[in-house]
Image (cartoon, helix red, strand yellow):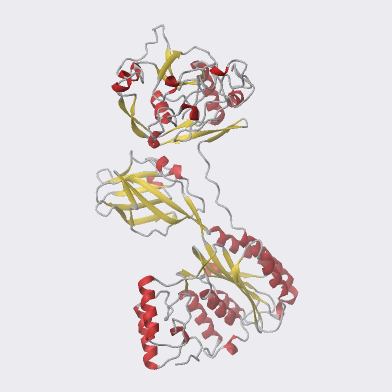
Amino acid sequence: MALAAPNRYVSNIDGDVNADGDVNIADINVLIDAIMSGRTDSQCDVNHDGDITVADINYLIDLILNGPVIPTAETGVYLGIIGYNQTLNTKELSLLDTTTVVGFNDFVSSLTTQQGRLLYYSVDQAIDALKTARNPRNLKNVAMVTFTKGVDQGSLMMTDKYDTEAEYANAITARLDNERIYGQPIKSYTIGLMNDNIKDANQFRSNLYALASDSTKAFEITDMAEVTPYFESIAEELVGRNMSETLTLIFPGVGTGTRIRFTLDDVDSETVNDSQIYIEGTFSLKSRSLTDIVYNGMVCNAGDSVAATSTDGMFVNMVFDGIQLDNEETIDKNKIQEWYWIDDQSAWEASTEFSASRLPDVDSVYSSTLVMLLLDCSSVMDENFDEMQAAVGTFMDRLQNIPEPEPIPDPGLITVNGVTFQMVAIEGGTFKMGVDTAMVEMGYANNDELPAHEVTLEPYFIGQTEVTQELWEAVMEGTNPSAFTGNPMRPVEQVTWEDCQIFIERLNELTGKTFRLPTEAEWEFAARGGNESAGYLYAGSDFIDEVAWYYDNSYAMGIGNDDYGTHAVATKSPNELGLYDMSGNVYEWCSDWYKPYDSEDTYDPSHSINRRVIRGGCWFDAPTDCRSTCREYQLAGMRTYSIGFRIAM
């Protein structure tokens, strides 16, 4: 049967015969009805072969089983423009960027005024254009922005569906309420210029509200000077919601029925009830999921039930996507805390097993926006037409400048007096400190590395490199005690344990932070690669030349050689955590008193020997002294060109 009649149905999803936004058995029923009744609606020709037959039913069944084919396009802001008077002058929806904006500006400049004002008809056509547009990836916003300087004139002549302006206006309102563009509602804004040309003020205002998706999006103005600010505010609202975030939460599984709250703002045990931004739900142990989820201070696409994407021992991983905070800020991962509801106490209790530092970075996802701009080009605009065109230019400029998300500050990147250094976040964990007896018996380790024992550490930060001479001078007002100078990136040396305390005290005053020397356990855990440890002998490798400046490549070169002595930090390969020079270059002071691992003795201040731990070996040491487990000590007041330090916090 030949196709002759115009489309009865309009949809932007292949196979959506009944235009309800999806493809299912209801579409097959419509198609069967068309075949049985002999209708020739071209939308029913889903396989596009020119006939409506059982082949179209088979095509629909395939779509239902395998999913509809939805054309996609590049992520971004897509703009279409309709200039309306007695006719419609249309610029089709296309990507708006720094290149295409020239064409859009040319189109706006080419618009001219004529009699007539097909207001309702232009909105009707704009909705159709949105429905048939290619679907940009990550579509989150669909909007229509209408500027008018009067009431409708002539739309009833463009269709035989309606007998009165009120009937047409009501139909448009219903479309705006009910239409979905790839599942997204239409946000419709209207800007109406009320002046002496308006004879029917009630009808004018009725149109403003009828063509807006809600009353907050209808703006009545009395001066063209107000047009640009309104256009700008609408553009700000559209592009301001063009980025969403994906948050992955990693937390210990608990008993079924436990209420869990994740707060994303700054709260403590006394103010957790006052949190303004949180995700709260009830844990199901059987399904490894959160149910009955409430999102406060945000919107989130994840839904009211989220299952774990994976488990890792006692921990579950859950992903929450499409998050947009109501305050339009980005998520600060380091503020996230987990709380359990304790029924007996009717209070929230902080989880001691949750660590924000183990969470992956929050992903920022840019979404797309479809915008149809409708412009009154009737003859009453003559005296204001240039101003409207200029306002549209501002609107387009703002739309194309999608704001980049504010970079999340790196809590480990510190600048003091113009010198920047990096602290590396170390996940807490449990490891076996020291060596097994066999290592000592074979001569590969020393007695003071016994016994191997389990140590559990909380998360902390440690310097990516040893403290450099550059940083020392920035903190200590230009002084430099080092023997090997000439390159400010060399590690500072000839500093006593007490000198380090003075440096740290001044650094804390300058930064407001709480730097300190690492404990011996923290130092060894970091040197061995923390939770990422590959079990290397040295810090980052079993081959010492890859990671360390030591006897063979430094001291053995001789005093007259450029490689004699210390070297600039980070010139060898890092270990698994990105830490440099934890083997070789200079020894590093730790905070601990030196004592056997199995001793409970503490330092007696009255004792004449004041020994502090040093770790890592130095530029004139043999390889065995540069091992990650090797321990040494020195008097706290010793100053030598073989000892420096790195800081922790």
Q: Nearer the viewer, residue 443 or 223?
A: 443
Left or right: 13, with 228 as reference point: left
Asked if residue 539 is positioned above or below residue 483 in the image, the reply reads below
Give the x, y percent position of residue 585: 52, 23
| Residue located at (40% from left, 83% from top) | 56
| Quarter assignment of residue 60 | bottom left
Of residues 431 and 317, the one drawn nearer to the viewer in this rendering: 431
From this view, report whether residue 521 is shown above or below residue 29: above
Question: Residue 4 location, x and y as percent?
Answer: 50, 91
* Number of numbered discs visible in the structure rendering: 0
Which residue is depicted at the point 54% across and 91% down?
160
Q: Position of residue 611 (x, y in %)?
A: 42, 13
Residue 515 at x, y = what percent?
A: 49, 28
Please report the residue visible at 39 percent of the width from the left and 16 percent of the height from the top: 594
Q: Is residue 391 visible?
A: no
Residue 201 in view in this figure: yes
For the N terminus, which image quadrant?
A: bottom left
Question: In the rendered image, which quarter is residue 121 located in?
Answer: bottom right
